[in-house]
């Protein structure tokens, strides 16, 4: 029997590597059962930990940039000397997991820290301290909705109001912008963004509406942010002559969008990353049982998130699929694959809050149910 353990992270709780480790400890190991341990990352929380876990490349290490701003320090990244590639996780810079609820205000937050990180990598490259060909950024779980323009402002994008005053690149100012200039800093490495959802940034509803509230935005904030981003996009077309595609990616508050338009960054869907990197060298048709899941499995999970991708990959294969979720929030008439079983760990506890505090216990309880059903 071949079993694929491929959980996604439980946002603001446990990362996928930890969950996979818990499951691996709870299932009996014997000669008749082979486990593939492939914790997922769709670019969001736990991206770096998954890169480190699944990587078979040499000289891959965690390093930190410290004290490049006065009020924050210690931002982890992974560097592969062999591939001359740096890996970054946007959730470590301005993610929901590090910004407390009372400080979540996407009107006044932006992605400038990513721009500052890229400037540091540029300095390292030019000084010969590090040979860098690629910077790969996992996108997801951010507290920002600025389409990446805050980060781009550190790399040469300037925005001005009607009185020619230079403005901070925060969404609260986007609607006031009447002119912009780009004195682009040339980066001697390629930028690649792994995005955790395929949702359109400016859809109706788009990513701004769908994910805005969980980032702390009110209805009026969402409207202001959306109108402001539309204004910046109009000015990019007018002042810089850059074509604006009809569909713009909305992952991480549209983080990759600004870099794609202004710096030619590549946007890589999570499905491609999961298939080509995490599940490489695995014949999916040989798998008998798949165990996945995430904190909240809902319609958004089908927008390119890890567990939704696993479900799509295996829905027409022989494997049985089990999702261990914190909660499952789907419409009552939503049609799920016949080979799917869902276990919600919230049902083991008296409240959602209690289940979040006891996620490890809940996962072990779910493992007991799976062991009894499949004699593991």
Image (cartoon, helix red, strand yellow):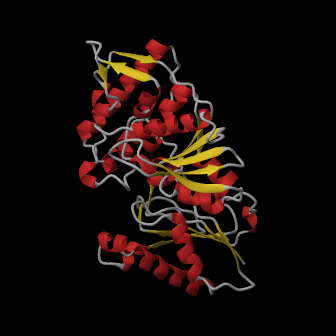
* Viewer-proximal residue among 125 and 165: 125
Would you say 42 lies left or right of 224 here? right
**Residue ID at (38%, 73%):** 346
| Residue 146 visible to an observer of this rendering | yes
| Residue 279 drawn above or below residue 172 | below
**Residue ID at (54%, 30%):** 260
* Viewer-proximal residue among 171 and 64: 64
Question: x, y percentage for residue 290?
Answer: 62, 69
Question: x, y percentage for residue 47?
Answer: 54, 55
| Residue 358 drawn above or below residue 239 | below
| Residue 341 visible to an observer of this rendering | no
Q: Indicate the quadrant containing the C terminus: top left, top right, bottom left or bottom right.
A: bottom right
Question: x, y percentage for residue 365?
Answer: 46, 82
Q: How many marks?
A: 0
Q: Indicate the quadrant containing the N terminus: top left, top right, bottom left or bottom right.
A: bottom right
* Viewer-proximal residue among 183 and 261: 183
Figure quadrant of residue 55: bottom right
**Residue ID at (44%, 76%):** 360
**Residue ID at (62%, 83%):** 374
């Amino acid at each position: 029997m071949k079993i694929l353990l491929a959980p996604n992270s439980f946002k603001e709780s446990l990362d996928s590597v930890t969950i996979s480790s818990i499951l691996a400890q709870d299932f009996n190991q014997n000669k008749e059962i082979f486990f593939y341990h492939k914790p997922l990352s769709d670019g969001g929380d736990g991206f770096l930990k998954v890169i480190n876990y699944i990587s078979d490349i040499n000289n891959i290490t965690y390093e930190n940039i410290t004290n490049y701003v006065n009020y924050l320090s210690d931002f982890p990244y992974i560097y592969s000397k062999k591939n001359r590639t740096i890996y970054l996780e946007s959730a470590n810079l301005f993610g929901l997991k590090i910004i407390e609820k009372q400080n979540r205000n996407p009107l006044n937050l932006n992605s400038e820290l990513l721009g500052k990180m890229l400037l540091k990598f540029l300095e390292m490259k030019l000084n010969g301290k590090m040979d860098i060909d690629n910077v790969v950024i996992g996108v997801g779980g951010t507290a920002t909705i600025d389409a990446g323009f805050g980060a781009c402002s550190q790399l040469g994008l300037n925005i001005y109001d009607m009185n020619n005053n230079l403005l901070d690149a925060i969404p609260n100012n986007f609607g006031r912008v009447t002119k912009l200039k780009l004195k682009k800093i040339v980066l001697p490495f390629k930028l690649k963004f792994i995005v955790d959802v395929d949702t359109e940034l400016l859809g109706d509803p788009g990513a701004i509406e769908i994910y805005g509230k969980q980032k702390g935005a009110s209805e009026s904030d969402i409207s202001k942010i959306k109108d402001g981003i539309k204004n910046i996009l109009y000015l990019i077309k007018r002042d810089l002559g850059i074509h604006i595609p009809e569909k713009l990616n909305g992952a991480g508050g549209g983080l990759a969008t600004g870099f794609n338009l202004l710096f030619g960054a590549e946007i890589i869907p999570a499905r491609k990353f999961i298939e080509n990197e995490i599940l490489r060298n695995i014949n999916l048709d040989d798998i008998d049982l798949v165990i996945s899941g995430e904190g909240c499995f809902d319609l958004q999970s089908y927008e390119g998130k890890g567990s939704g991708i696993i479900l799509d990959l295996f829905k027409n294969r022989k494997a049985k699929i089990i999702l261990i979720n914190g909660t499952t929030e789907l419409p009552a008439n939503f049609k799920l694959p016949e080979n799917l079983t869902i276990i919600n760990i919230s049902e083991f506890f008296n409240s959602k809050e209690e289940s979040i505090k006891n996620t490890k216990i809940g996962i072990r309880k779910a493992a007991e149910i799976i062991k009894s059903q499949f004699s593991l």
